[in-house]
Image: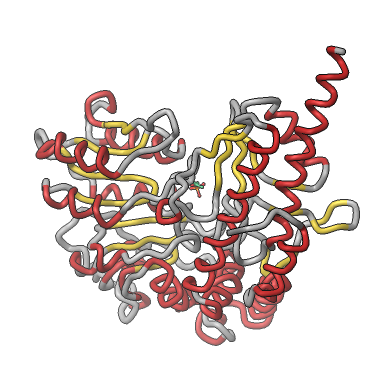
Amino acid sequence: MFENSLEYAQQLDLEDNLSHLRDRYSIPQQKGCDIIYLCGNSLGLQPKLAKEYLLQELEDWAMLGVEGHFKSNNPWFSYHEWFANPLANLVGAKPTEVVAMNNLTVNLHLLLVSFYQPKGKRNKILFESTAFPSDRYALESQIHFHGLRPEDCLIELHTDSHGYISTESLLSKITEIGEELACVMLGGVNYFTGQWFDLEKITQKAHEVGAIAGFDLAHAIGNVPMNLHQWEVDFACWCSYKYLNSGPGAVAGIFVHEKFGDGSKLKRFHGWWGNNSKTRFKMGKEFQASIGAEGWQLSNAPVFNMVAHRAALEIFEEVGLTNLRRKSILLTGYLEFLLLEINRFHQKDLIKILTPANSDERGCQLSLQISTDGKNLFESMVKAGFLSDWREPDVIRISPVPMYNTFEDVWKTANFILEYFTSFYQRKTASTA
Ligand SMILES: *Cc1c(COP(=O)(O)O)cnc(C)c1O
């Protein structure tokens, strides 16, 4: 279906009706040239408008002081409210089910306070063994917080030798733990393997055994389409600096299903920003919860930290995730095709793709296990202006992002790897001759 040539890649770029978006981002430079940036899964690129938006808020602060809460161009009192619609669109939720606040791990803790309530035998949390370390630390410390032991309560699902966790094995594990399962907490898209889990089926099964279903969507949001409301997911959290391009440490977000109303039936840590906005500034003694996810807010909105998020989400609103996803499937599919060509060309299994081949089980990212000289390959790529990321002992994660990467980027990357191995084997032959 695809062809392995630069001309073909350039033709795909010409046919790409999203190619103009690249111009809206600052592309990092090396020796006066655009870097081929394949790290959008780690830190997305800067939308050019972010600077202007930041200057606007600095200017309003300078001119208005405290009056900026209500009189600035984008009043700070309600600044976070702007995010409800775009975030709802990205995760398939109602606007009242989402809110932009804090950072990811902070939010995971706040949500676990509400949603991990061990009772008797029902005290177990199911998660994936390749979960992001921060999630593991959060889960372990929550278990300790309840006076329990992670050895007893945290159940890890291990991947098979291909780095894969099948839906069947996930669902049967949930059934097996049954009435002892308090909560499923998985990465929606696993950060290491790039596997996208079937959140709907997992949620359904968790509910069948009476457990809560929560997900960390750090690698899913802005990457794959979701329908959290319809799937009846209980809670979710995410960060915004990966596929959402909102800058290092940018404000994160949460989803809480509307079935939890004003949250009054759950345990929760409260702060004044979770108070209903109508009475928030009345400074009363009694907490009056906002309806929906807003009730989980603690503090007033970090406006400087939200400006890039706003600039970034405006572009998602304009383009729509459906269009991005269509391109993404093609772009990652093209990368996969070219990488497998390298194996074929060298008649060796140099690259094992850990990420599922089925596009319904992955987003942008491909995780490549390199059998030969991986670390040197990675370092040569960086030197030559191809930025991806390395995970010990032998994995390169590459993420062509539909928002700003091109088919030419993908072709040049695969071609670099092909030529790297060609010269690697030439050197080897020469040294043994
Ligand atoms: C990126 C990422 C994090 C990072 O957490 P922060 O609180 O934003 O530093 C946590 N969990 C997952 C799954 C991630 O991918």
Position of 381 with respect to 299 (left or right) is right
Type of colouring: secondary structure
**Residue drawn at point x = 38 percent, y = 32 percent:** 159
**Residue drawn at point x = 51 percent, y = 78 percent:** 317
**Residue drawn at point x = 72 percent, y = 69 percent:** 11
In the rendered image, the quadrant that contains the C terminus is: top right
Of 356 and 29, the residue lying toward us? 356
Of 237 and 188, the residue lying toward us? 188
Q: Residue 88 placed where, x, y %?
A: 39, 72
Q: Residue 297 placed where, x, y %?
A: 37, 63
- Count of picture labels: 0
**Residue drawn at point x = 56 percent, y = 62 percent:** 330
Identify whether 333 is placed above or below 315: above
Position of 417 with respect to 273 (left or right) is right
In the rendered image, the quadrant that contains the N terminus is: bottom right
Looking at this view, name the residue that lies furthest to the top.
432
Q: Residue 242 placed where, x, y %?
A: 56, 55
Position of 146 with respect to 91 (left or right) is left
Q: Residue 210 placed where, x, y %?
A: 11, 48
